[in-house]
Image (cartoon, rainbow, N blue to C red):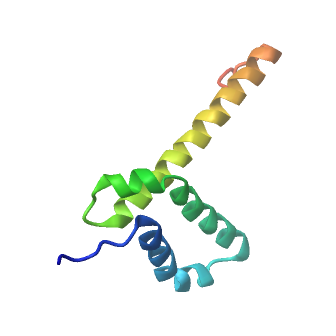
Amino acid sequence: MGRTVLPFTQTLYQEESSWKEFRRALRKEDRELFDTLFSDARYHTAACACSGRPVPFEAVLMSILVETRRAVRDLSLRLEALEAGTGTLSDSKS
């Protein structure tokens, strides 16, 4: 019999647990951000499992980047909508 591969969810929790000392050293408000990063990665567990990366943390980081990029895109779209409603541009100078 071959080795059993852990489900990626377990791998992710093990990875998060390995960062507990780092997390503990962070300020309280930064701990909340840290927890959000791993929450973002859990949102993409299926994609991480399919990635087949030799180092699972690479897939975790990519998931975090995807969610960060999504947040930036959504904020940019909201800003554009606000600027269109007021008729101002963010790069214009008064």
Residue under the image location 66 percent in, 72 percent down? 31
Q: Quadrant of the C terminus?
A: top right
As displayed, is residue 79 above or below residue 62? Answer: above
Q: Position of residue 20 (x, y in %)?
A: 54, 83
Q: Nearer the viewer, residue 15 or 74?
A: 15
As displayed, is residue 89 above or below residue 66? Answer: above
Count of numbered marks: 0
Q: Quadrant of the N terminus?
A: bottom left
Query: Going by the picture, which residue comes out furthest to the left?
Result: 1
Quadrant of residue 33 in the image? bottom right
Q: Position of residue 90 (x, y in %)?
A: 69, 25
Query: Going by the picture, which residue comes out furthest to the front?
Result: 1
Asked whether, in this view, residue 78 is left or right of residue 3, the answer is right
Q: Nearer the viewer, residue 86 or 72?
A: 72
Quadrant of residue 28 in the image? bottom right
Q: Position of residue 92 (x, y in %)?
A: 68, 20
Q: Is residue 73 visible?
A: yes
Q: Is residue 94 visible?
A: no
Residue under the image location 65 percent in, 27 percent down? 77
Residue under the image location 58 percent in, 79 percent down? 23
Residue under the image location 56 percent in, 56 percent down? 40
Q: Position of residue 18 (x, y in %)?
A: 46, 82
